[in-house]
Amino acid sequence: MPQPTTDSNGFVEKIHWPSLVAATSAISAVGIAIGLGLPLLSIILEKRGIPSTLIGLNAAMAGIASMLAAPITTKFAHRFGVARTMMVAVMISALSAIGFYFAEALWMWFPLRFTFHGATTTLFILSEFWINEAAPPRRRGLVLGIYATVLAVGFALGPLLFSLLGSDGILPFTVGAGIIMLALIPIFIARNESPVLESKPDRNFFHYIFLVPTATAAVFAFGAVSAGGLSLFPIYALREQLSESQAAVLLTVMGIGNMAFQIPLGLYSDKLKDRRPLLAGMAVLGVLGSLALPYLIEHWLLMAVILFFWGGCVSGLYTVGLAHLGARLSGPDLAAANAAFIFCYAVGTVAGPQAVGAAMDVGGNDGFAWALAGFFGFYVVVSVGRVLFRSNRG
């Protein structure tokens, strides 16, 4: 049952624990499975002698599936209900995960990738919508900080599972599918508390991309920097004469920063009347941290400290941006905006690696830092512009 809490101003609010646990548990299970599946699938294709270009093309189906699934997710949720749509998506994800083991032909992996990531995109959108609807307004940042932290832990546990299970046999596939299926339990328990979409959104899907641009631009920048940075940082580090182990440790430190800062940032954002200055400030720190990389790369320990805080700023764009979105919208509009939010994230994950790679080809190794600074700089312009023009919504 919802439990009342009282904030520092004396406002009594209700925390819908079954809803929060259901949505967070569901997406965390999917996070673990994705963290396990991404290296697993790449290694298997490599062992089969598949060219790197085709492996990359197959992996790119994830972003394409996310972009195509986002506009239709809200329609399914309106027609069939949020909890029911999520449970169907869980089952489709699990069946797709196990299907990779039985699919021997490469061409079969393309529809499987599309189906798996389309279903998980649906889970991401509806989980975040459910959490945003269930979170008390004055505790939204805290709740979303917990959500982001648990999700980050889930993504971190996936590769750990892969290191334990390996890539041989059906076991890693059955473990991944089983973890996904566990998400059915909390969703089923809290199904009667899931938000109800009694009406369809009034606007076209793409309108929601620009309805709260401070939030959607934040997640675009987050997707671009995280995907571009994580995928190409090892190459950047090796070209700067760092060892593979040093590069791996630096990425781990950045991941720890991602996890450590989400709850504090969420708590702090709850105290603000307007989260946009905080988002702009994190983006400015992102620009400065990116531009500092070429000067810090020779000082490994200092580099690790900077990446710890920089990693927190990167993920903070997602957490605080999502909280800002929930504070501005509700009901069908929030569901549609959450779909647009994930759509922009998917676009960022596709654009980021391409832009960073191209910048390194054109500008040398320093192009890595310039490209990341460019994405952060784009967001600084958007967020500062919204504050200066004093838009009440976005």
Image (cartoon, helix red, strand yellow):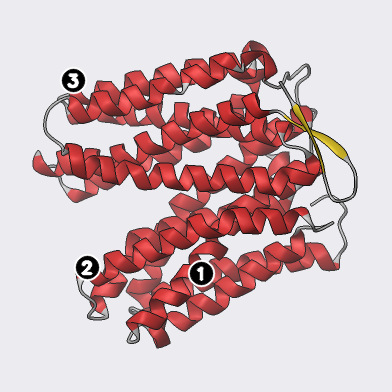
According to the picture, the residue beneath numbered tag 1 turns out to be 310
Report crowding for label 3: few under 14, some 14 to 19, many 20 or more residues within 10 A (C-alpha).
Answer: few
Quarter the N terminus occupies = top right
* 125 over 209 or under it: above or below: above
The mark that comes first in sequence, 3 or 1, is 3
**Distance between the alpha carbons at the discs numbered 2 and 3:** 35 Å
Which residue is labeled 3 in the image? 102
Do the CB atoms of the residues marked 2 and 1 lie less than 8 Å apart?
no
Residue 210 in sight: no
Direction from residue 119 to residue 132 in the image, left or right: right
Q: Residue at x 15, y 37 (%)?
A: 167
Check disc 1: other Cα within 10 Å, few if <14, some if 14-19, many if 20+. many
**Where residue 359 sits in the image (x, y, percent)?**
40, 71
Rounded to the nearest angstrom, the CA distance separating label 3 from label 1 is: 41 Å
Q: Is residue 243 above or below residue 273?
A: below
Amino acid residing under circle 2 = Ser
For the residue marked with disc 3, what is the amino acid?
Answer: Phe
Amino acid type, callout 1? Trp
Q: Which mark is residue 245?
A: 2
Q: Is 200 above or below relative to 249?
A: above
Cα distance, mark 2 to mark 1?
20 Å
| Residue at the spot 46% in from the left edge and 36% down from the top edge | 28
Q: Nearer the viewer, mark 2 or mark 3?
A: 2
User: Quick one: SS at disc 3?
Assistant: helix
Compare residues 246 and 121 and report the one nearer the observer: 246
Q: How many marks overall?
A: 3
Residue 101: x, y in percent?
Answer: 19, 24
Is residue 334 in view from this perspective? yes
For marks 2 and 1 on the same chain, the one whose residue lies earlier in the sequence:
2
Q: Is residue 20 left or right of residue 394?
A: left
Pointer 2 local density, CA inside 10 Å: few below 14, some 14–19, many at least 20: few
